[in-house]
Amino acid sequence: RIRETVGGLAEKFPTEGETYHELRSAFSSLMMGYGRNIQTLTRHIGGVQIDRSMHGQAGAAQAPLIPVDALDQRRAANALKQFAFSPDAFEFVTADLISRLQLQRRGFEFFELEANEDPKIHSIAASIQSSALDQLLHRNTLQRLVDSELYGNEYSITEAMNALDGAVMGGEPNTFQEGLQLEYIRRLIKISGLKSESSYGPQAQSQAVFLLEKHLPENAATPHQAHLRRLISNALEGR
């Protein structure tokens, strides 16, 4: 619904005789909501449902700790791929809308902005994607995927990281996904422990090394691929 609402903003705002600031404010509010929805999805991956009922209490769960169903985790992973990580995840923010996201000038502080006044759509998308990666690649999340297999979790760390990897690195990247891929590779390097000591468990480190080697291109056909190659090769060679 948020994507549909954002797509129709340019038809509803601004009010006749008013500035475009109300359009920009509405857009900002909706994108904040969009980011919160993405965050909610990430909580399913490696999630554990907690029931604090007393033993024998009516309506209590079979056990106080129950991993999120594997089907629900896979659904969340697919939704994250579609709405956060795919090349067309932010195509609902149209060119017509972007060209109308003008700030209202209010006094001389307008000129004290740290950057020029054009809308930073790439930064907005990157913030949403980065927050999702914060949760999905947090050491607690990845370790919980490993630990919870011992009490019923059927969505392994291997499946989870492969799903994320496919979502981020699959397809032909556009400018949104280029930035995302660089951020993702830097995080894999940190997890791997190849360049500095890692606080992650052995399974997460091994997964990170495997994925880094998988994405080391033999030949770089674009500047973006050359950038990825340099980051990965430096890490694998300990430089």
Image (spheres, helix red, strand yellow):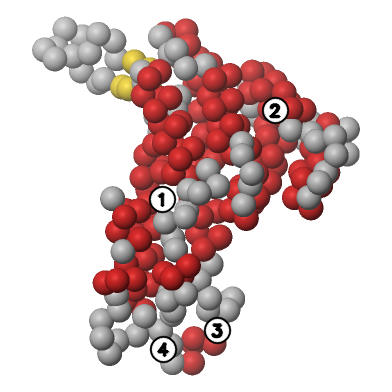
Residue wearing tag 3: 112
State how far apart marks 2 and 3 are (Cα): 44 Å
Q: Is residue 227 visible?
A: no
Q: Secondary structure at mark 4?
A: loop
Q: Residues within 10 Å of mark 1 (few under 14, many from 20)?
A: some
Question: Residue 134 location in percent, x, y?
Answer: 53, 41
Q: Earlier in the sequence, mark 2 or mark 1?
A: 1
Residue 150 drawn at (x, y percent): 47, 7
Q: State which tag comes first along the sequence, 2 or 3.
A: 3
Which residue position holds label 4? 106
Per the image, the residue denoted by label 2 is 211
Residue nearer the viewer, 66 or 15: 15
Classify 198 as above or below 133.
above
Q: CA distance from mark 2 to mark 1?
A: 27 Å
Q: Which label is found at residue 24? A: none
Label placed on residue 35: 1
In the image, taking residue 209 as reference, residue 145 lies left or right, namely: left
